[in-house]
Structure formats: structure tokens, C-alpha cells
Amino acid sequence: MNIPKQIDEIVLHRQEKLPQIQQMIERLENVNNVIQKLEKVCQDASFEKPQIYESLFNQCSEIAENLRLINTKSFRQRYEKVQETLNQLYNRFSRKQIHISFVGRAGQGKSLVMQKISGLSGDIIPSSNGSDCTGTKSIITNQDTTGVHAEIIFYSKNEYKDIVNKYIQEIFENGIYEINSVEEISVLKQYSLETKVESNAQKQSLFLQLNKYIEHSDVVLPLLGTTQTIPAEEIESYVAQYSHLDKSHKYYKYLGVKVANIKCQFPFSQCGKIVLVDTIGLGDTALDIREKMLSTVSEDSDAIVMMTRPDPQRPSIVQYDIDIVNDIGAKMSSDYTNKMLFWIINQVSEGEGKNIDGISEFLSRLKRMRDFPVADYLVVDCNDKNAVERDLLIPILEKLPNNLPQMDEMLLKQAEGQLIELYWEYHEISSKVNKAFNASIDQDVKREFDLVIKKTYEKMTNNVREAYVNEPYGKLRAENCKEFEAAAKEKMRNILINIPTKQTILEFLDNGSINQHNAYERLTDKMRILIIDDFLELNKTLEKLVTQMKQCIVNILANENSGRLKYIIVSNPENADMWLKEFIEFTQNYPRYKPITDAIKKLSAFNMSMESFLIYRVRAQLDEIDLSLQAQGPVLQGSLAEKSTLADDIHFWLEHYLEIVYQKIQTELATLYAYPNSTLWAVIKDFYDRIVYSQNKDIDAKTAWRYLYENSIPQIWREDYKNYQAQKGIAEDWNTLIEEIHKYDNKNLYQFN
């Protein structure tokens, strides 16, 4: 298995998805800008004396009343969630390596394993037996380079200030000692804060951490806001809490480090482009460690390695470890951890902490936890470099090519689900805006456009009538469908072309058939299925004909010289199925449009298939090659001892009977070639009847179309309406805002291409 090549393919496939994610992020920013404009208008409508659209609201107070009812809070919450998801996806797919994060309690062997994989020593990756030594988030990147160096990114001054204030808020009531800038940290020394901390263990512990920020601010402040490249021998002093040689030698630069990216070449050649992500051990006294770990897992991780070193005296499963896995599952989804979270059991074979004797029972207990969201449990001697490669690294890397692309697709689908939820929030707002906007379409407007609405409706319905009376379907109604006839005749020719050859027949005879008749029967059984399957492929021709018919109707409805509906249905009218689907979504929310909705639904749902009208006719002509329906089969010459002669005779009879089948199917289908044209004609005629003559309760089709056109005057006759409104002194940007809102009320825009 070429793991580096497979990792490269995963990275490339991810990067191919970046344009559509970026396009969606930008589109949603435009959607948000439109909502922000609307919020200003809604706020203006709530004033006793509006500032923006005073003349409009004075002319029609119902507009302002409807606008005041619009609430965008739910949309905004979903928008922020979706943007966060999309940004995480974009960052994930932008990575040029695969990230493997190591999580777990302090002292479980995370750093030790990273040392073995990367080949780095303890003076670069700090590790300690049973206690936490890592001071900050570190990542180790495998790259083709000589030597070792680190890129250290420090917090900004504002980020650092927020960290200090978070401790102050947690420790002191009302955060009374909060600082406004990092320069004020030194002032905190004057307050003798240790005397003001409550005597509970949690706050005392948090204060010890806060005191590090206070006492050592002179070391950290000059580094804030910078990025520095550090040689190997200095890395420990930036990422560790103390020296690996002398624990009493403390370091404090890590307090200001946001992330340390250590770069080197890993010794295992099959690693490929991977990055190891270290995290501060859970249980450390630093604030928000758990939240930071979960953030790292969700934002910076592809695979997740959960480290546990069972206690040698009591090798029981610690609830804290179970909670870690459950928290990650809740953050990433259990489906994700089922594929990408690996629980490593750190086996110590000798010396201090020896726990090998209890590992088997520990593993057994883990596996008894049913439906626990873990990809695999791996027992590894983490102190042995070869064992780490063999039992940990290789098993994880081998699962990446299959599991990781599946998870990427899952995350995209989850994002798309959030996008659709956002669309429905937007659609609800758009519907309320339309209600407000329609209030501005008063009787004067309707009278002004009455004649053009009538002409448009008549032109549209006349064009549909022309399609079934003359061109194209009126003239074709009684004629054979040339496309279908040509395709069917090709299938009939295949009956004779696909007659089994003598060689094929000999192969049947050589496969241990009981007798010659058994071979003949098996061949005819095979031919019947082959013929039926071949004729079922005519469904493709029928589907194409139906699509062409629907496209003809959509062109009539959408064209600006006919129905002009392209101005209210955003989907491309060249895609008939998608356009009809959106038209249904547009009309079905309005009871007054029901005759239109019913007509469009009937048209959209229509299809033709071989199963519905033809395949039983073809099957009825296959009796000649179905021995189960014959009183007696053909008399075959020769025996199994004379296979060549027998094969010739079987071939003769197959050819004979398949010629009969051919003639029968040809006769049967000759009268049916006009079926597709006559059927498509009937569908168009039915559609015409429904959009002209149908009635639902008190609303007939013609009235429904008048309502639809009246309510859509500003979109369908945009320039004429703007000129009319201008004459009445109504601001043009009001109409522009409505157009923008309508533009993004399209579910297709909230789906990845």
C-alpha cells in the first residue's frame, strides 16, 4: 500500500471542493447583507416618523404594519452557525496535510508517542511520566527538510488580555480586577490578589495559573503579536512548562504561545503528508482546557488518537476517558468518531508503571461497551518505536484512504442540511416581505397593469394551444415517433446479433450439463432475460422524449415573449425538471394559486416507461424460447459424446426460434410506434385544459393566473413598475431591496453544485 500517494489523492480531492465552498460563503455574505438592509427598513417602519420610506408608509400603512412583524433573530442564529461550519470546512479542505490529533488526560503518553513517530527527542517534545508538561498547543509537521525548527505564533495583545480577564472573571466576583490592556497586568501585583481569593480548591487552583500570567508578564509581553522561527535547541523553552533535564527549571514563554508548528522529517517513510497535533493534557489547571481540546479536535483534526495508560494496580476504565470520547462524539458526531477516533491502550512492559498484566482485561472491558463510538482499540507499547509504527501508526494510516473521504462527504452533507434549514428561515422572511410588498400593489397598480396581464396570459395559453394543435405535437400526434421507432428496431436487431455462438454453446456443454436439452433450456433462459433487459433500455429514449415535452412547456411559461415567468422563478428554465419543481414550491404556499399548482404538479410528475405500456407485449412474444410453456422442445441431433454436432444443432434451433421471436415482436410493435407522440400530445392538451378551464372551490384557473400576475407585477414588469412608482414618488431603492430579497429566495442557491 502506497500511503503517501493515497494521502496526496485525499488532499487533492479536498482542494477540488474548495471553489464551491468559497462560492457558498460569499453567497451567504450577500444574503446576510440583504437581511441587514431589511432590518434597517423594519426598524424604520417601527418609528412614529420613519426616516427612509416615509412617503411609501404614508401611502400604504399596511406595508409598515407587515414589516414590523418580521423577526430575523432565528435567521441570524442559523446564519452564524452555518458560516462557522462552512469556514471550518474550508479550512479543513485547504489543509495540505492530514492532521492526527492526540487527546487524553495528562501523563497518558501522548507526547511519548509523538516523539516515536516524529523522531524528535524529549528536549523538543516535552513528555513526563504521569504529569502534564506540555504548555501549549503544538503541531509537528512531516516535511522533506534537513534539521528541525519551529514556527512559533504568539497571541495578539487583545487575545492575551482576554485570557487574563477570563481567569479574573472565574476567580473574582463581578470581575472587579479586569484589565483594559496587557500593559495593566503588572498593576495587578499591587492588589495582593492572593489574599482575596476564596478558599475553595478550584479557585485556588485557577489563581495559581493566573499568577503565572501576572508574575511573568515581563517575559511574555514583548513576544505578543509576533511569529518567530526558532532552532531545535530552543523549542522546549517555548512549548514546555519546565526543562526535561531539571523540573525545577521552569519556562513561561508558553503562556503567550498560540501554536507552535515544529517541522522535521519523520523517520517512517510511509507517513506521507501528516501533521501530529499535541494538546495540553486534560486535568491541567489551565482554564478552558477541555473546550480548547474540543475546538482543536473539530477545527484541526482528521484522525483522533485517544491515549490511555491503564493504572498498574487498578486497570479499570476511567469515567473521565469515557466522557472525553462522548464529548468528542457530541462535537463531531458519533458517525465521525466511529470511523476516525482510535483508542490507544498504552502498554508498559517493564519498569515503573508496568501494567502489561492487566491490559487483556482492560481491553475486554472496553469492547464490552456496546455501540461505543470508536473506530478501533489498539494496544501499543508506546515506549518502543517499532511497536508505535507497527501497532499504531500503520493501522491508522491504512484506514485513512477509505474512512476519511467518507467523513468528508458526511460533513458536506451535514453542512448542506444546515444550509437548507437556513433557506427555510430566509424563505419565511421573504414570504413576509412579499406580503408587505404586495400591500403596495394597490388597486390603482392592478388597474394600470390589467391589460398587459390579460395579454400575457392569452399569449401564454395560446402558445400552449399551438403546441398541441400545430407545432410541434399537433402534427406529430398521429405519426410514428421516429426516435422511439429507431431505438426499438435497434433492440430487435440485437435479438439476432446476440444469438449464442457455437463456442458459447460448447462451453455450456462442457460445464457438466446433465443432457443436451438442459443446455438448450439454460441458453433460452439466458436469452429471455437478455432481450427483456435490452428493451428496458428504451426507457432512456422515453425519458428523453418526456424531458423535451416538458422543456417545450417550460419555454412557453418562462419566455419573456410568452408567460414571462422567468422573472419570478430563479432556476434556469433550460432545466425543465428543476424549474417546474421550483414553480411548485413558489405557488403551493398560496391557496389562491391552487389550480396552477395542480396543473404544474401533474405535468412535473408525468413520465413514460417500458414497464407501463410495452414490456408485457415484448414478454408475450418470448414463449417460443420458454420450454416451461412448450409441450415439447426441439428434437436435438447428436449426444454429449458428439458435442460439436450437438452445438451446431442447438445453434440452428436457437436461430430458428429467435427469428420467430423477432418477427412476432416486429409485428407487435409496428402498431405502437405512434404511442409516445400521442401520449405527449395528450399530456399537453390536459395541461392546457387545466390552466384554462380548471376550478378549485371558488377560484377558477383564469382568476388564479390573474392573482399570480398581479402579485408579481414588480418582478415581471420591472421597468414599467419602477416608472409607475416613480410617478407616485415611491423610492426606487425600495423596489431594489425587494428584488434582492426575491433573488436569494431559491433553494438551489443553498445547495452545493
Image (cartoon, rainbow, N blue to C red):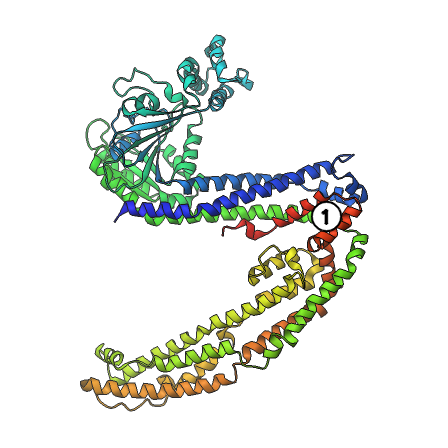
- Does residue 646 sit above or below 67 in this rendering? below
Q: Nearer the viewer, residue 646 or 441?
A: 441
Q: Position of residue 563 (x, y in %)?
A: 67, 62
Looking at the image, the residue that sits furthest to the left is 641
Horizontal and vertical percent position of residue 163: 47, 23
Q: Residue 274 placed where, x, y %?
A: 32, 39
Residue drawn 62% across the image and 74% down it:
471
Foreground residue, 688 or 418?
688
Residue that mark 1 sits on: 437
Residue shown at 61% from the left, 64% from the top? 554
Helix, strand, or loop for circle 1?
helix
Image coordinates of residue 541 in percent, x first then y, are 48, 72
Between 60 and 251, the one lying in front of the other is: 60
Q: Answer left or right for 384 relative to 8.
A: left
> Can residue 317 be seen here?
no
Judge whether 581 appears above or below 482 on screen: above
- Answer whether residue 472 is visible to the viewer in this image: yes
Q: Judge the density around disc 1: few (<14), some (14-19), many (≥20) Cα neighbours within 10 Å.
A: many
